[in-house]
Amino acid sequence: SQTIHQWPATLVQPVGSPLSLECTVEGTSNPNLYWYRQAAGRGLQLLFYSVGIGQISSEVPQNLSASRPQDRQFILSSKKLLLSDSGFYLCAWDPSGLDNSPLHFGNGTRLTVT
Amino acid sequence: TQLLKQSPQFLSIQEGENLTVYCNSSSVFSSLQWYRQEPGEGPVLLVTVVTGGEVKKLKRLTFQFGDARKDSSLHITAAQPGDTGLYLCAGARFTAGNKLTFGGGTRVLVKP
């Protein structure tokens, strides 16, 4: 069966510090991978998605970047965090090439920038 | 502006009551999904509706996709405290490569 791991679960970082959040998927190959950000108790905003190694699409201009160094690894990064980067970050995957397939989410990382 | 608008944003009811959550848009979707999210966890899929006018039932939950595939509703009958959570609708559009767009969510609190 497929599983998705996201870490860390919580993170407190000072403004101006770098960020690296990691997400890995097991039990599937060539998944589509996604990074979402969620404001408290609200909907999800798509930040990045990837259909393959090294292929990253950005949905919104921002202070963050993403990379996919391996087929089942997706990393969210920042060189210098801003206060506005605080939020709940969710990684998700779905199988490529299938219509209407659901997203499978990790348990998220709650980032607080102080 | 939000492509998918959910209403209400927050709903507090007593155990045993019924509730309906709405998800509306001016855009047509190829499919629409409903998720439920618990605090500190990722959303989990409840159902996917694909055909206009489609109705799907999941125990006490009834999901409907509008005839024009622009809106959807979630109805819960005889709500229980275990139904408490954030309900999210998400639509896929052909013109967006079928990437999902999420609504703003409806927080449901069922009090015992």
Image (cartoon, coloured by chain):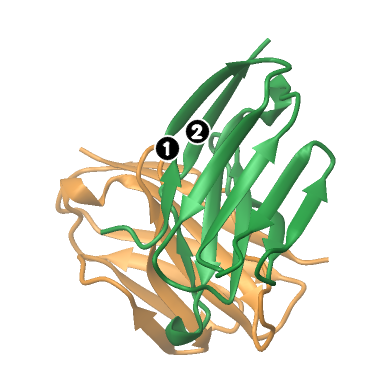
Mark 1 in CB contact with mark 2 (< 8 angstroms): yes
Chain painted green = B
Q: Nearer the viewer, residue B46 or A7?
A: B46
Name the secondary structure under disc 1.
Answer: loop
Q: Nearer the viewer, residue A17 or A61?
A: A61
Name which residue lies at 46% across and 44% down. B105
**A54 left or right of B13?**
left
Name which residue lies at 59% across and 36% down. B20
Quarter holding the N terminus of chain A? bottom right
Chain painted orange = A
Query: What kind of residue is marked 1?
Result: Gly
- Relative to B104, residue A28 above or below: below
Q: Residues within 10 Å of mark 2 (few under 14, many from 20)?
A: many
Query: What kind of residue is marked 2?
Result: Arg
Cα gap from disc 1 to disc 2, whole angstroms: 7 Å
- Relative to B6, residue A33 above or below: below
**Percent x, y for residue B82?**
72, 26
Q: Which residue is mark 1?
A: A41
